[in-house]
Amino acid sequence: MNLYFLRHGDAEPTSAGTSDEARCLTERGKRETAAVAQAARSAGLRPEVILTSPLRRARETGEVLQEVFGVPAHADERLGSGCHLGAIQDLVAARAQDPILLVGHEPDFSSIVGQLIGPARVRMRTSGLAYVQTERVEPGQGLLVWLLTPDFFASE
């Protein structure tokens, strides 16, 4: 199984009158997400399904991915803040598609990727994309194939 974990792009800071759920992507977030997605596409990524957190910044990240890959992005509550390995197991069990591109948040994705490949420590930056191969979505059963950050592809 091929799992791709993408942390949402750079988002507006929390401000008075704006809830965390309503924070949207910045132009930088859109640009960096597109750069990482295009690099992954050039490297051969062709997701069968794109699932995002229901939070606005993750859904907007999914829209960028949808443009790059031509695959519709769908929000799933299980990818919201507080996502854990059990939620990923449920998501994968419910879908036969492979590869799966997931869009979520920190510290959730660093923890989940670390559990799959470790125990290990991983740091998912905004627009960071981790590729994990695994036979089973269980702790220590995955192989981190690569981890991309926007630093390599996007400029300020």
Image (tube, rainbow, N blue to C red):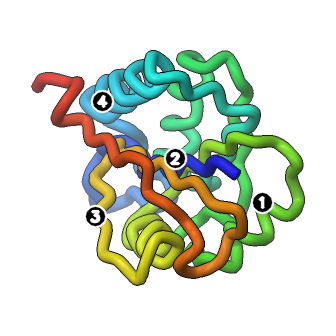
Asked if the residues shown at circle 4 and circle 3 are in contact, with their CB atoms under 8 angstroms apart, the answer is no
> What residue sits right under mark 3 in the picture?
123
Q: Amino acid at mark 3?
A: Arg
Who's the residue at 52% across and 56% down the image? 104
Q: Position of residue 72 (x, y in %)?
A: 73, 28
Q: CA distance from mark 1 to mark 2?
A: 19 Å
Q: Position of residue 95 (x, y in %)?
A: 86, 52
Helix, strand or loop for disc 3 = loop
Q: Which of pointers 4 and 3 lies earlier in the amino acid sequence? A: 4
Give the side of residue 96 with respect to residue 151, left or right. Answer: right
Who's the residue at 41% across and 83% down the image? 119
Whether 156 is drawn above or below 59: the answer is above
Q: CA distance from mark 2 to mark 3?
A: 18 Å
Q: Nearer the viewer, mark 1 or mark 2?
A: 1
> What residue sits right under mark 2 in the picture?
58
* Residue 92, disc: 1
Q: CA distance from mark 3 to mark 1?
A: 23 Å
Q: Residues within 10 Å of mark 2 (few under 14, many from 20)?
A: many
Q: Which of pointers 1 and 4 lies earlier in the amino acid sequence? A: 4
Query: Which residue is at the front of the view, 104 or 111?
Result: 111
> What residue sits right under mark 4 in the picture?
32
Q: Nearer the viewer, mark 4 or mark 3?
A: 3
Q: Residues within 10 Å of mark 1 (few under 14, many from 20)?
A: some
Give the side of residue 142 with respect to residue 154, left or right. Answer: right
Q: CA distance from mark 4 to mark 3?
A: 17 Å
Can residue 5 be seen from the camera position used here? yes
Helix, strand or loop for disc 4 = helix
Asked if the residues shown at circle 1 and circle 4 are in contact, with their CB atoms under 8 angstroms apart, the answer is no
